Amino acid sequence: MRVDGSMFDKDGTLMSFDAFWVSLSVKALEDVLGQLGMEVGLVDEILVAFGVRDGVTDIGGVLCKGTYAEMGEIVFDILAAHGCTADREDVVKLVEEAYSRNAAAGDVKPTCPDLAAALAELKGRGLRLAVVTTDNEPITRHCLTGLGILEDFDVIFTDDGHTPTKPDPFCAGEFCR
C-alpha cells in the first residue's frame, strides 16, 4: 500500500494539551474576571467545571471536548451564581476573545522531544502533511510556530466557521483529494 500523506491532530498529538490549555485558561479566565470586576479566586471553580483538576484535564471535560461558546456558558453560570449581572452573550463573547487575546500565555510543548525531526523525516519521504483541529486559526498557527513545525504542513484545517469540524470526515476527504 502506498502512503502519500499523514494527518495529525494538534492537541495531545503534536503538543501537550495540559501544558498549553491549562496555563492559557488561567490567564484567559483572569482576564474575563478582571473585566467584569469579579474575584480571580473563581478561576479554580471554573477550571473544575471545565474538567481540570490539579492541572490535568479530563478528556471528557469541556476544556478538552467543548467549544468556546460552551466554556462561556459555564463561565456565565458560575459568575451569575456569584452575583455577576453581565449579559450571557457578553460573557460568552468575552471568554472567546480572552482566549484569543491571551494565546501567548499557553505553554507550547511538543509531545515528544524529536517531533520536528520526525515530521522532517516524513516530509523527506515525500509525504504531504496536514493538521486537523477544532481550534481557531490564530491559536493553531501560534502553537505550530511555537513548536517550530508550521512550515512542515501542506494544509491546516481549523474551525473557521465554514469548514465542518471533527469528527466530520470532510477534512480527510479534502486532504485525500
Image (spheres, grey):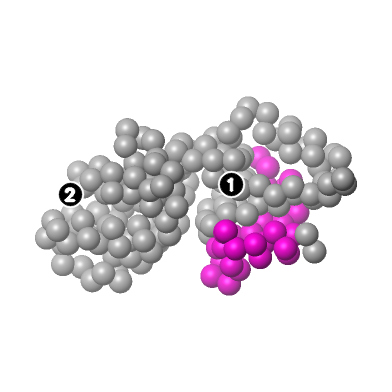
Q: Is residue 142 above or below residue 124?
A: below
Q: Which residues are magenta?
A: 148-175
User: Which residue is located at x 25 percent, y 62 percent?
Assistant: 76
Residue at image mark 1: 10
Mark 2 vs 1, N-terminal side? 1
Answer yes or no: is residue 22 visible: no
Residue at left offset 67%, top offset 56%: 156
Q: Residue at x 42, y 56 (%)?
A: 66
Q: Is residue 11 magenta?
A: no
Residue 90: x and y, percent?
29, 69
Is 157 contained in the magenta span? yes
Helix, strand, or loop for circle 2? Answer: loop
Residue type at numbered disc 2: Glu
Residue at image coords 30%, 45%: 47
User: Which corner quadrant of the image does residue 169 belong to?
Assistant: bottom right
Q: Quadrant of the C terminus?
A: bottom right
> Residue 63's spot in the image, x, y percent?
40, 49
Residue highlighted by disc 2: 39
Give the residue at the far front of this rendering.
Answer: 1
Q: Is 113 or 105 nearer to us in this picture? A: 113
